[in-house]
Image (spheres, rainbow, N blue to C red):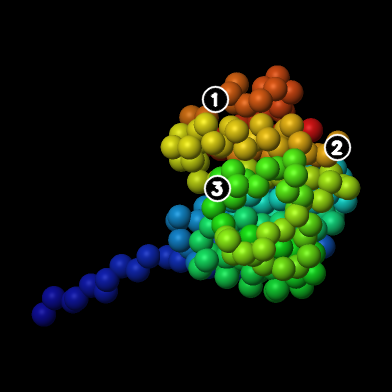
Amino acid sequence: MARREKPKQTKARTDNPLRIIGGKFRRSILKYSGDPATRPMKDRVREAVFNLLGKAIEGTVAIDLFAGTGAIGLEALSRGADCAVFFERSHATARVLQENITSLAVDDVSQVVVADTLLWFRRHQLEAAGLDPTGASFADGEAQPRLTMDKPWCAFFSPPWSLFTSHAEEMLWLVESFVSFAPRGSLIVVEADENFDVVTLPRHGEWDVRQYLPAVVAIWE
């Protein structure tokens, strides 16, 4: 009798867990479902970005605009950011994000905004909104957070790369808004793929552009 082959099993992300790379939470494991719709920035890219930012991250308000698991904003907190605000449109993913925040005991300096990032900022003028991280979480339509202007921001644009094509005008409008209204000394990090034309960025000559193919990272101060 021929032997019946066992069905092949797809390996889960747990074989290579998502971790904080540096700082006081280094090597802490973050919860991640493995859903490809939630695309954490690759470890090597995240490490390179934070090496480039260096000590400039310290004392900032980290704003993780397309948060997913929260790996970027939590990495920023690990490396010295004062507080962090996370925007995530999926309620299910936001619950995982909140679990990661709680696991690192940073609830008091973290805020989760459950909303579509582009729609949220269209409704709330950036220069007047103010984000004031209080540890509270907000669903779209609830009382909204405020953006504090008394310390520099470090804003991370690391969305699904397709947004730079499907919502190009809105994405560039949001980047330009941050460039225009962020407090002095702020940092903006954009991660896209190699199909994104960095020349379209506002003040394109002022960006430090690095390639970690297929990712392309641009940093502005």
Identify residue for label 3: 119
| N-term mark: 3 or 1 | 3
**Which residue is rendered at x = 67% and y = 28% of the image?**
209
Give the label, 2 or 3, closer to the camera: 3
Identify residue for label 2: 185
Relative image position of residue 21 (x, y in whole percent): 71, 56
Asked whether 147 or 210 is in front, the reply is: 147
Element type at marker 2? loop
Could you classify mark 1 by the number of other residues whose Cα lies within 10 Å: few (under 14), some (14-19), or many (20 or more)? Answer: few
Q: Residue furthest left?
A: 1
Relative image position of residue 31 (x, y in whole percent): 59, 68
- Amino acid identity at mark 1: Asp
Asked whether 205 or 151 is in front, the reply is: 151
**Which residue is rendered at x = 87% and y = 47% of the image?**
151
- Amino acid identity at mark 2: Gly
Gap in angstroms between the C-alphas marked 2 and 1: 25 Å
Q: Is residue 138 visible?
A: yes
Give the label, 3 or 1, closer to the camera: 3
Q: Eyeballing the image, is 41 above or below 8?
A: above
- Amino acid identity at mark 3: Leu
Relative image position of residue 155 (x, y in whole percent): 71, 44
Viewport quadrant of the C terminus: top right
State left or right for residue 120 relative to residue 165. right
Could you classify mark 2 by the number of other residues whose Cα lies within 10 Å: few (under 14), some (14-19), or many (20 or more)? Answer: few
Identify residue for label 1: 197
Give the label, 2 or 1, closer to the camera: 2
